[in-house]
Amino acid sequence: MGDILVGTCSWTDPALVRSGWYPTGRRDAEGRLRHYGERFPVVEVDSSYYALPSERNSRLWAERTPDGFVFDVKAFSLLTGHPTRSAVMPDGLPADARDPGVLDEVWARFATAIAPLRSARRLGSVLLQFPPRFRPGARAETVLAETARRCAGWPLAVEFRHSSWWQEERAEATCALLARYGMAAVAVDMPQGLAVSVPPVTPVTTPRLSVVRFHGRSAEWQHGNKEERYRHVYGDDELAEWLPRLRELAGRVEQVHVLFNNCCGDAAVRAAERMARLLGTGPLAGPGTAAGRTAATGR
């Protein structure tokens, strides 16, 4: 049975910092990460989507977290075909993903930036979250193949934002495609019944890893702003719905990463704490620990 690691999709979100979850004396950059790392065994780095991370920060992250702690690093927006502001591009490079030279340079910088996490064995995965317009087809398969080539040897997790990837008639082919490149499929919890809804399926495409991201169930998901879309407080009944599926995943992979993205105030950390307790781990469980093994077995 694999370990189930529960955490959140950010530890630096301004709303979380303002919420008071971090105690007095631990609200600087180092104190926040150390406080978080004492309570959860995994976190997603979402800031790397908005701007390229730095090698220095990766080294500091590894130094400030306990043994066994892992980071899931979200790929920079340009690398997954999202609109990217010119202001965050390095050295004045154009924000043009169609330019092979630009892509080569940005991928190289991203690889250098996360190298300390890889060296310290703290890289849980690189999250490749593709935009809703990224649909099944020859072009998408070419992008996935090229991404796999660039990221050879990295643990990769893929989140598709268009439901057609997981429609019944297509799901088997999607699984085979991700399995071909050793990419873990990302499952999501989000509002259902909307044009943008992705079903909460839990495919396994690599024996190493499965990732489940909880986006919240806000009724404003389709038309609200970012804060409105992610404003949701999970109830224990909503979390409990996932317990059998998480344990089933743990029976098939080495690690399951359960990450809460309802980043509004302290909603994500509170949901993660409750999920860990429902799984029987408590908030301090880590990979390889007795509590972490309890998470996988449910005992």
Image: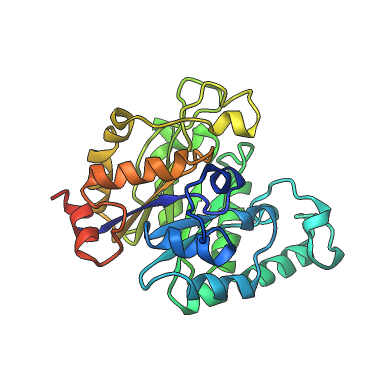
Give the residue drawn at x 45%, y 42%. 268
Q: Residue at x 73, y 63 (%)?
A: 103
Q: Is residue 173 visible?
A: no
Q: Position of residue 96 (x, y in %)?
A: 80, 54
Q: Position of residue 91 (x, y in %)?
A: 84, 68
Q: Which of 277/151 is in front? A: 277
Horizontal relation, residue 11 to residue 253: left or right: right
Mark yes or no: residue 212 visible. Answer: yes
Question: Which residue corresponds to the image point at 84% horizontal and 63% vertical from the top-left?
Answer: 93
Which coloring applies here?
rainbow
- Up-down relation of residue 147 to residue 116 (above or below): above
Task: State the image coordinates of residue 245 (x, y, percent, origin top left).
Answer: 27, 40
**Which quadrant is the N terminus positioned in?**
bottom left
View extreme (front): residue:
24
Q: Is residue 110 left or right of residue 44?
A: right
- Residue found at the far bottom of this picture: 119
